[in-house]
């Protein structure tokens, strides 16, 4: 998996956590989910953790899927 980049997070006074990607809000976590995220972010690669929590990460199969006959729609 390529290294994730462009993520930042902000912990707010009310306990919510906003994760931003390239300046745009990707998700807002509240309550127990926010606490779990903060715990995981403190112990792991923060960029990868934020990518996983927002669902914004590549799985490595995009090119293969794009070339599949079902997805070519008459191209090629």
Image: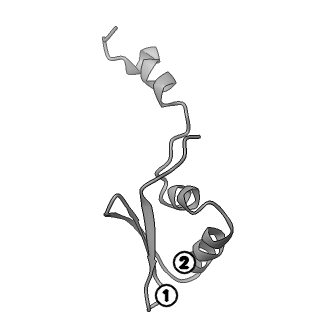
**Residue 32 falls in image quadrant:** bottom right
Q: Is residue 71 left or right of residue 47?
A: left
x and y, in percent, of residue 53 in the image: 53, 61
Mark 2 is surrounded, within 10 Å at the Cα level, by few (under 14), some (14 to 19) or many (20 or more) other residues, namely: some
At horizontal 55% and vertical 39% (from top left) the residue drawn is 59
- Say which of 46 and 58 sits in front: 46
Q: Would you place residue 38 above or below residue 65 in this image?
A: below
Residue at the outermost bottom position: 13
Choose the circle earlier in sequence order: 2 or 1. Answer: 1
Which quarter shows the N terminus? top right
Q: Residue at x 44, y 66 (%)?
A: 8
Residue sitting at 54 percent across and 77 percent down? 34
Is 21 drawn above or below residue 35 in the view shown? above
Task: Name the disc covering residue 34, or none.
Answer: 2
Q: Residue at x 48, y 31 (%)?
A: 62
Give the image location of residue 7, x and y in percent: 44, 60
Mark 1 neighbour class, 10 Å CA radius: few under 14, some 14 to 19, many 20 or more: few
What is the distance, in whole Å, between disc 2 and disc 1 at their CAs?
7 Å
The residue indicated by pointer 1 is 15
Q: Is residue 58 above or below residue 19?
A: above
The quarter of the rendered structure image containing the C terminus is top left
Residue 12 at x, y percent in the picture: 43, 85
Secondary structure under tag 1 reads loop
Place of residue 52 in the rendered image (x, y in percent of width and height, measured from the top left) = 55, 56
Q: Is residue 68 left or right of residue 40?
A: left
| Up/down of 2 relative to 32, above or below | above
């Amino acid at each position: 998996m390529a290294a994730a980049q462009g993520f930042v997070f902000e912990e707010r006074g009310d306990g919510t956590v906003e994760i931003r990607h390239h300046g745009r809000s990707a998700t807002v976590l509240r309550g127990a989910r926010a606490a779990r995220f903060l715990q995981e972010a403190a112990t792991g690669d923060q960029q990868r953790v934020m990518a996983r929590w927002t669902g914004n990460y590549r799985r490595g199969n995009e090119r293969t899927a794009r070339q599949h006959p079902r997805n070519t729609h008459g191209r090629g």
